[in-house]
Amino acid sequence: MPNPPALAAAPMEIFTDGGCSPNPGRGGWAFVVVQDGQSIGENFGGEPRTTNNRMEITAIIHGLLSIPPGAAATIVSDSQLAINIISGSWRAKANRALVKEAQALVGERHITFRWVRGHAGDRWNERADALAAQGIGKVSRENRKKHKRPGKRRVTSRHCDDLRLQAERDRIPFDDSLPVHLIP
C-alpha cells in the first residue's frame, strides 16, 4: 500500500507594523508570524530617533529574519510604501541601506506581499500595531531611565556660603530661603 502524500504545511503570513510618536521621534516596530490562523511567533522593538517609514521597513526585516532562508511566506503590511519599495515596484529615495537589507532577505526566501488597510479591524494587523506601540513605550521607558531628572538638591551650608559670596560679588541681595529651583 503506497504512503499517502505528505500534507504541505499551511502557508505562513508575517504581519508587520511600525510607527513613530511623534514622526520623526520615538519609534516602534513589530511582527506577528501566523500559520493556520494561530500566532507562532512575534517580536517588537524600538529606536529613540527614527521615522515611520524606517520602522515599517525594520518590522519587515525582523519578520523576514524570523523565518529560515528558503521558507515561503506572505508579508502583510499596512504600509504601501514599504511593500512597493521592498518589492521593487517603487524606487527608494530614503532608507536605502534598510531597503537593500530587506530586499536581500526577500531574495533568500519565497515571499509575496499583501497590503491591508491599517486600523480596519484585521486581527493580526491590530496585534502588530499594538506590539509596535509597545516598542515605542519601551524606548520611552529606556529614555526616562537614561535621562532621569535628579530630585531636589539638598542645600548644604557650604553651598549657601558659596552662593552668598557669589551674590555679594555680583552685588545681589542674598536670602538663605531661595527656592530650590533657583539654586544652581
Image (tube, rainbow, N blue to C red):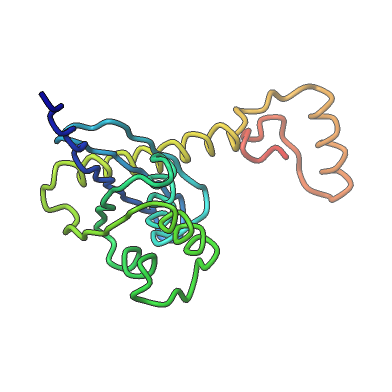
- Residue under the image location 50 percent in, 60 percent down: 98
- Location of residue 150 (image quadrant): top right
Q: Residue at x 39, y 65 (%)?
A: 86
Tell me if residue 45 comes above or below residue 24 in the rendering. above
- Give coordinates of residue 53: x percent, y percent: 40, 62
Question: Quarter holding the N terminus?
Answer: top left
Q: Residue furthest front?
A: 1
Residue nearest the observer in this picture, 66 or 118: 66
Residue at left offset 49%, top offset 56% = 50
Residue at the spot 45% in from the left edge and 54% down from the top edge: 105
Image-based side of 63 in relation to 101, left or right: left
- Which sits in the foreground, 91 or 36? 36
Residue 145 quadrant = top right
Q: Position of residue 74 (x, y in %)?
A: 26, 52
Q: Where residue 166 sits in the image (x, y, percent)?
A: 85, 42
Quarter of the image where the C terminus is located: top right
- Of residues 111 and 133, the one nearer the viewer is 111
Q: Nearer the viewer, residue 7 or 90?
A: 7
